[in-house]
């Protein structure tokens, strides 16, 4: 019985919107309320959820606009708003951070990526891109040891790396004056070529 209740609780936690829809329909049916109230109640629920989670929805709206149009410009106001409101939309954060790097706003990009890594859970693919972008922001802000440490952390967190990863790490070691490690990672990149 305990495992059944735990399974039900996990289902409710992972699909709260479906549970609200189901419970609303059940309540309306049991109480004999006119069916159009279902749409009113669900509408109020989703408006409330949108307002409660506004930064995340704004970030996701920006990300959706960027993917839909193929251009970042329509998404920028959404990204800015979402970031200022401390969104948890990791896709929006990575995309906005990349824009900041492209526009040479390195300090702001650095703060954005540092904030991203404070989020409780980040999708592994997004985290891998964020590590690389964070290292670039650190390098551009003059923190070569931080950029190296970020990419070294990736070496412990992931198994597969591409040629640009090794050349970038080799370049950072050249910048740091550690030519032996620079040679090691550059040779790794050459082996992949």
Image (cartoon, rainbow, N blue to C red):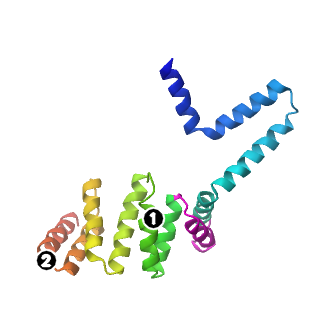
> Does residue 185 appear left or right of residue 96 in this picture?
left
Distance between mark 2 and mark 1 Cα atoms: 32 Å
Mark found first going from the N terminus, 2 or 1 = 1
Q: Residue at x 39, y 69 (%)?
A: 133
Residue 140 position in % (x across, y down)? 35, 80
Instruction: Tell me: residue 169, above or below residue 176.
Output: above
For label 2, the crowd category at 10 Å Cα-Cα, with few meaning under 14, some 14 to 19 and many 20 or more, is some
Q: Give the secondary structure at mark 2.
A: helix
Give the SS element for disc 1.
Answer: helix
Residue 177 lies within the magenta run: no
In terms of image quadrants, where is residue 12? top right
Q: Residue 50: horizontal and vertical position, in percent?
A: 68, 54
Displayed quadrant of residue 148: bottom left
Q: Residue at x 43, y 58 (%)?
A: 126
Answer with left or right where residue 184 lies relative to residue 102.
Answer: left
Q: Write the start and end of the magenta stretch as one range.
A: 67-89
* Residue 14 visible in rendering: yes
Q: Is residue 158 visible?
A: no
Q: Which mark is residue 86?
A: none
76 is within the stretch colored magenta: yes
Name the disc covering residue 115, or none.
1
Which one is nearer the viewer's eye here, 61 or 110? 110
Left or right of 122, for residue 185: left
Image x and y of residue 111, in percent: 44, 71
Which residue position holds label 2? Answer: 179
SS majority, magenta = helix
User: Which residue is depicted at the point 62% across and 54% down?
Assistant: 53
């Amino acid at each position: 019985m305990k495992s059944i209740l735990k399974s039900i609780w996990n289902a409710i936690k992972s699909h709260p919107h479906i549970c609200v829809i189901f419970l609303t329909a059940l309540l309306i049916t049991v109480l004999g309320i006119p069916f159009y109230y279902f749409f009113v109640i669900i509408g109020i629920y989703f408006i409330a959820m949108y307002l409660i989670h506004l930064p995340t929805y704004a970030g996701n709206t920006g990300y959706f606009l960027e993917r839909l149009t193929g251009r970042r410009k329509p998404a920028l106001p959404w990204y800015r708003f979402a970031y200022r409101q401390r969104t948890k939309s990791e896709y929006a954060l990575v995309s906005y951070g990349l824009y900041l790097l492209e526009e040479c706003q390195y300090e702001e990009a650095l703060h954005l990526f540092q904030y991203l890594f404070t989020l409780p859970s980040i999708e592994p693919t997004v985290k891998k891109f964020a590590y690389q972008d964070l290292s670039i922001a650190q390098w551009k802000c003059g923190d070569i040891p931080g950029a190296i440490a970020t990419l070294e952390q990736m070496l412990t967190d992931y198994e597969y790396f591409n040629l640009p990863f090794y050349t970038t790490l080799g370049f950072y070691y050249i910048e740091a004056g550690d030519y032996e490690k620079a040679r090691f990672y550059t040779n790794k990149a050459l082996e992949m070529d």
